Amino acid sequence: MAQYARNAAAVAVIRLRNPPVNALSLTVLQALEDGLKRADADPSVKAVMICGENGKFSAGADIQGFSSPKRQGIALGPLVSLIERSEKPVVAAIEGIALGGGLEVALGCHFRVAHVQARMGLPEVTIGLLPGAEGTQRLPRLIGVPAALDLITTGRHIPATEALKLGLVDEVVEENTVEAGIRLANKLIASVSLENVSSKENRELCKHARILTGCPAGQPLGPRRLSLKPIPRLPNMEAFLSEALVKVKKQARGCLAPELCFQAVKAATEQPFADGVQRERELFNILLTSGQAQALQYAFFAERAVQRWTTLSGASWKSASPQPIRRAAVIGLGTMGRGIVTSLVKANIPVVALEQDVEYLNTGRKAVMLLLEREAMKMGQDAQSLDFHNPARLQFTVDFDGLRDVDLVIEAVFENMALKKEIFKKLSGICKPGAFLCTNTSALNIDEIASATSHPQQVIGTHFFSPAHVMRLLEIIYGRHTSPAAIATAMQLAKAMKKVGVVVGNCFGFVGNRMMFPYVQQAVFLLEEGSRPENVDQVIEDFGFKIGPFRMSDLAGLDVGWRSRKGQGLTGASLPPGTPARQRHGRRYSPLPDLLCEQGRFGQKTGKGWYQYEKAGGRTARPDPWLHSFLSEYRDTHQIKTRFIDQEEILERCLFSLINEGFNILAEGIASGPEHLDVIYINGYGWPKHKGGPMFYASTVGLPRILAKLQKYSEAHPDVPELRPSAFLKKLVAAGNPPLKEWMSCSGSQSSKL
Ligand SMILES: CCCCCCCC(=O)CC(=O)SCCNC(=O)CCNC(=O)[C@H](O)C(C)(C)COP(=O)(O)OP(=O)(O)OC[C@H]1O[C@@H](n2cnc3c(N)ncnc32)[C@H](O)[C@@H]1OP(=O)(O)O
Ligand SMILES: NC(=O)C1=CN([C@@H]2O[C@H](COP(=O)(O)OP(=O)(O)OC[C@H]3O[C@@H](n4cnc5c(N)ncnc54)[C@H](O)[C@@H]3O)[C@@H](O)[C@H]2O)C=CC1
């Protein structure tokens, strides 16, 4: 709701109230409208001030409400117009946040005062929409087209100081914003009422008030009504807009909202306000029914739902308490350790960084310092807080004794079980008993690692993604003995590092990599049957992935998987003589990646892999004629008839096999709901957010279709168990293809947190 109050000085205060973020539900909007009408009808009220309860203006429209099929009632756009048309001055006092519809309400007000710590923005684009309450028409009139386009197409939140520079707010205060708003309202009352009084003294006062408010004589609010303002012209508006469109399209990667946001702002530059609003509405409705908005809003709530973690044994976020991490250690400063140290320093956690010898330590130190210097450059003035040259904040050592007083250790040494167990045994003897011992393994068994310690309840997997200081995902893996406090602490750590933690159970590859295996496997099988790497990558990238499986594997290094397959005895010296080239343990196997590695083709690092590069370490992938003839020879050798494989088959075999593994994971209780898998894929594997994650995508395709396709591919490839439909998928189809929220109740294990 919105609370209406009067104070003695003739200022009516309307306070938006809908905890926790004062979202503009229909009830709030109705109360806001009632408050405005009441203020208008009351002759003793001379000005209105709108603010929010609990130090927050408003986070905008109620996102939950968008998915409601029966959404009816007062619309926000007309309400913003109503505010603007008020004959009595209306002031917005912005504390905390003014986002989306919240900022649009403020744009309808005649004046805006913001607290110095407030943040503002129009983030609708991030949930697949555009600022549909006339924001795309008012904002460019206030701050100009370039700045408005930037805010509307990126959805970024800006601090009050930047808002002041842009002219988005009139005043920034450090003290009580509501009082500052009332003070401004009183000045405005003086300005208006003194207009009609002719004494010299009052005329002077009136002039003073006009300077304060910027309102010309006789027209106290006219120029403050943004709908009446012309768009600030640019000398080269057309050229600017066409360049901006190219940029927006490039960044959007198949997501509709940024381009439609652009179209709405463009309309503001070409049409009168009312027509621009009409266009904004049309574009908003296209987005609202596009499917992408639903996917992005699902992703928004999924990210919040995974914070409420539970384990198979019943431990949960409700009862577990995180322990404070005053000091942490990282072991191994290779690709991952460097990024992990950087993330910890950025989270203001003092770190001890340890390597196996001085040479590795020096290399690691240089790399960490370089990363931190770069981060500091990006942070500008705020970089001082990093203070990473201070040994109390960041210390490098080769001595395990330096780890005696740390509260948490993150191990990031080579992916080798024997080495990891040796390290954990050592840590168990050296660290204090309460210290949490985390491993960054990408697939190994957490319980086996924990078995090397005397307190396995303190051991947990914290799986970062490369580059660790950039990627938002932290997969948090609990073992059989991991304590709830360890899980809660890892989740808290993720938050401190501004990452999204997702709690999952222990199995080979956990959730993300386990689902990735069949996807990559299918991609390689497709090469055996007739595709080229660039065909497969193109289909996956057209779907919206940032990078296809072959470009990705060239980037990560083909040798990484090769080492792991050798370790598992799938290739290399330990392979029993007589093993068929394309079969392991009775299942289809492709030796193609092994053959490339044997040729020294490790990907970007060697300048050749699935593609060719300009040089070793080069970044530009070009199709490689050598590889094409190599594939032809390979098919001849193994008597595989090359066939044309269409885009649909490429997409379905790669994605449906990944989704199928997702259903197995859900059935086993490794993840407590589909939203966990989706958050992992969006934040760790570049799954296009506007497609909502693999399981959400499956729900939009329809489970019966996925099942039918898997059955078809499985029949064609009976030696590929990963294509055999999961029993849980079959169960869901038999249960009538229930909506995603109800899947887990069919599994009999857990329920959805969405
Ligand atoms: C047909 C209809 C026509 C309508 C006309 C168009 C109107 C428009 O132009 C459309 C809009 O306004 S769309 C909304 C735009 N606003 C946003 O995207 C802000 C989303 N919220 C945030 O960024 C952070 O929550 C925020 C920065 C606010 C706070 O972050 P925190 O990290 O402090 O807290 P969270 O955990 O994210 O949030 C706390 C709880 O609040 C829920 N929530 C947040 N924003 C919401 C919103 N706008 N609507 C509904 N619920 C919302 C959030 O889910 C969380 O709930 P719980 O998980 O249950 O605690
Ligand atoms: N590279 C990647 O993309 C990802 C790797 N991981 C996992 O992270 C871990 C580390 O991987 P990378 O950083 O890629 O490996 P890396 O080979 O780049 O670095 C490993 C580092 O550990 C150090 N090290 C080895 N033995 C040590 C010891 N006894 N004491 C101290 N330091 C020691 C090495 O000197 C080396 O600097 C592995 O478990 C890997 O599976 C997880 C996610 C992604």
Image: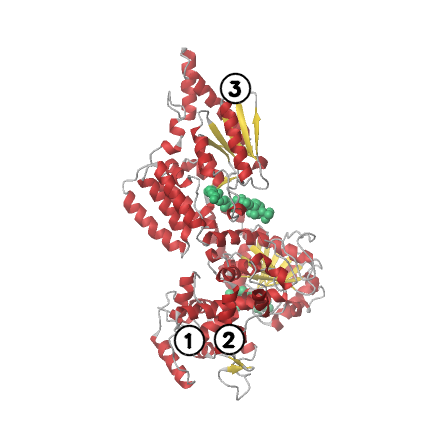
- 10 Å neighbourhood of mark 2: few (<14), some, or many (≥20)? some
Q: Which residue is under mark 1?
A: 527
Q: Nearer the viewer, mark 3 or mark 1?
A: 3
Q: Can residue 175 be seen in this view?
A: no
Q: How far apart are marks 3 and 2 (CA)?
A: 77 Å
Residue 223 horizontal/vertical position (percent): 38, 28
Is label 1 in a helix, a strand or a loop?
helix
Is label 2 in a helix, a strand or a loop?
helix
Q: Which residue is under mark 2?
A: 714
User: Which residue: 56% across, 80% down?
Assistant: 569
Three-letter code for the amino acid on which mark 1 is drawn: Leu
Q: Distance between the residues labelled 3 and 1?
A: 79 Å
Relative placement, left or right, of 732 versus 253 is right
Three-letter code for the amino acid on which mark 3 is drawn: Ser
User: Which residue: 51% across, 82% down?
Assistant: 583
Q: Are marks 2 and 1 in contact (CB under 8 Å)?
A: no
Q: Which residue is under mark 3?
A: 44
Tell me the quarter of the picture where residue 146 sits.
top left
Residue 480 horizontal/vertical position (percent): 68, 65
